[in-house]
Image: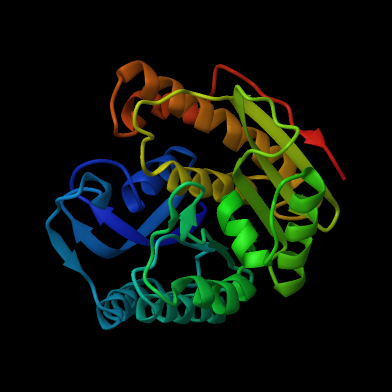
Amino acid sequence: MTHIISIQSHVAYGYVGNRAAVLPLQRLGCEVTAINTVQFSNHTGYGAFTGEVFTSAHLKEVLDGVEALTGLCDVQAVLSGYMGDEGIGRAVLESVTRVRSASPGALYCCDPVMGDIGRGFFVREGIPEWMRDCAVPAADIITPNQFELAFLSDQSIASLGDVLTAAARLREQGPSVVLVTSLDIDDSTPDTIEMLVDTAVGSWRIATPRFDFPVAPNGAGDFTAAVFLACCLRDQDGINGEGPARALERTAEAVHALFTHTFEAGTRELALIQAQNEIVAPRQRFDAERVR
């Protein structure tokens, strides 16, 4: 059975961070060890929240306990998302190093959460540069949105050529697979939203219908990174060959199913429970187009 360590935030109410990642990973057949970087009452986007940010020492202590029980030798991947500060970031990379020592083939999937178009950066000062200089080079798979891709590659993103050039630059730094989410470029259809996966052997693009949410639900990026990682690990090609292309299609289908249920429910929170069966067996299929 595939075993993933997911190091992310946790909320008591709603679905972001590990709350958006663990259930889909489990429904896709993965054993998940969730290590929480914070425990908040709810997502900070609501304005008011309560809870606690955990220290890097706390994360290390939790991993110590897991290692004492399991040896970490059965871990296939580490997944990380939002990082509150550089100390948490360093603790995440130390965890990756420990896992790789025990399980040399383990992958690191980094969702470089930093900001978004229209919002700009929403992380602490120094995190974007740390993400670019430390986390991305250590990763096997990264899942930036269009805004984050532009920052990490130090170039503007307006066309398909820009996306491919930027993704190639990031692969030169270390990752084998770059999944770009929330893609909206000059030839995109207005009523769709796109994703693109770029690897050394090819690049594929996929479009799904856009939903006009009154308030965009949080946690979709956390969900997307988790599903994509699980699909890459399930595929016999893994992160090589055309494995990421198939993972892209499966991920797009799962996200579309989740958004469909969320839109129909009229809720600000992701309708993860209602959509859980379609994460495994989506009703609507989408085909990726090879663009390189």
Q: Is residue 30 left or right of residue 170?
A: left
Depth check, front residue: 226 or 136:
136
Q: How is the image coloured?
A: rainbow
The quadrant holding residue 188 is top right
Q: Nearer the viewer, residue 203 or 160?
A: 160
Q: Nearer the viewer, residue 4 or 16?
A: 16
Residue 78 left/right relative to 166: left
The quadrant holding residue 183 is top right
Whether 217 is drawn above or below 103: the answer is above
The number of numbered badges drawn on the structure is 0
Horizontal side of 152 relative to 124 (left or right) equals right
Residue 116 position within the rendered picture, expressed as x and y whole percent measured from the top left? 49, 51
Which residue is nearer to you in this view: 88 or 32? 88
Q: Residue at (51%, 43%) from the top-left corner? A: 224
| Residue 104 in view of the camera | no
Q: Eyeballing the image, is 171 above or below 241?
A: below
How far from the left and from the top, in percent, is residue 230? 55, 47
Q: Which quadrant holds the C terminus?
A: top right
Which quadrant of the figure has residue 38?
Answer: bottom left
Q: Position of residue 17 (x, y in %)?
A: 35, 52
Image: 248 above or below 114: above
For the point 50% across and 77% down, the residue is 130
Q: Visible in this render: residue 58?
A: yes
Residue at point 66% right, 34% down?
249
**Whether residue 208 is situated above or below residue 126 in the rendered picture:** above
Q: Position of residue 69 (x, y in %)?
A: 33, 73
* Residue found at the very far left of the displayed protein: 50
